[in-house]
Amino acid sequence: MKRFTSIAISASLLCAAGLANAAGNQLSTVSVQGTDKMSAACTPPDSRAVCSAWHEEIRRNFTPREIGMLFGARTSYPNYAASFDRLQARYSALQGQFAATHATELNAIAAK
C-alpha cells in the first residue's frame, strides 16, 4: 500500500510540475496575412461582376477534380503528390493573367 501511495504522489507531483512549466512557456499569438488578395476579395459567395468572371474563368480552365484539389482537401486525391505543383503553377499563371486584365476592378474590391 505504501508503494502505491508513493507512486500516486510522485505522479501527481510530476503532473503539477509539468503544468506549472507549461504555463510559463506559452507561445505568443501569431497573426497570419495572406498574399492572395484576389482570392480573398472574391471568396464565394460573391455576386460582383469581376468575381463572377473570375469564378467562371476558374471553371473554364480547370476540371472539377482540379478545383477540388486547389480549394478542397487536396490530400484526399490519389494523384495529389504527382500533380499538385503543376496545378498550382497553372492556377498562379491564370491568376496573374486575370489580375492584369481586371486590375482596376480588383483594386477597388481589395480597397474595401
Image: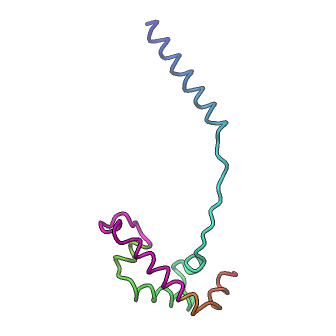
> Which residue is depicted at the point 29% across and 66% down?
78
- Residue, far right: 111
User: Looking at the figure, which quarter contains the N terminus?
Assistant: top left
| Magenta-colored stretch includes residue 49 | no
**Magenta residues (range):** 71-97
Q: Nearer the viewer, residue 16 or 85?
A: 85
What secondary structure do most residues of the magenta stretch adopt?
A: helix
Q: Residue at x 46, y 89 (%)?
A: 57
Lateral position of residue 3 relative to residue 107, left or right: left
Residue 71 rendering spot, x and y as whole percentages: 44, 72
Examine the image and state in which quarter residue 87 appears. Answer: bottom left
Q: Is residue 109 left or right of residue 45?
A: right
Q: Position of residue 46 (x, y in %)?
A: 54, 83
**Taking 45 as reference, is 5 above or below it?**
above
Q: How many marks?
A: 0
Would you say residue 77 sits in the magenta stretch? yes
Q: Is residue 95 above or below residue 13?
A: below
Q: Toward the viewer: 65 or 3? A: 65
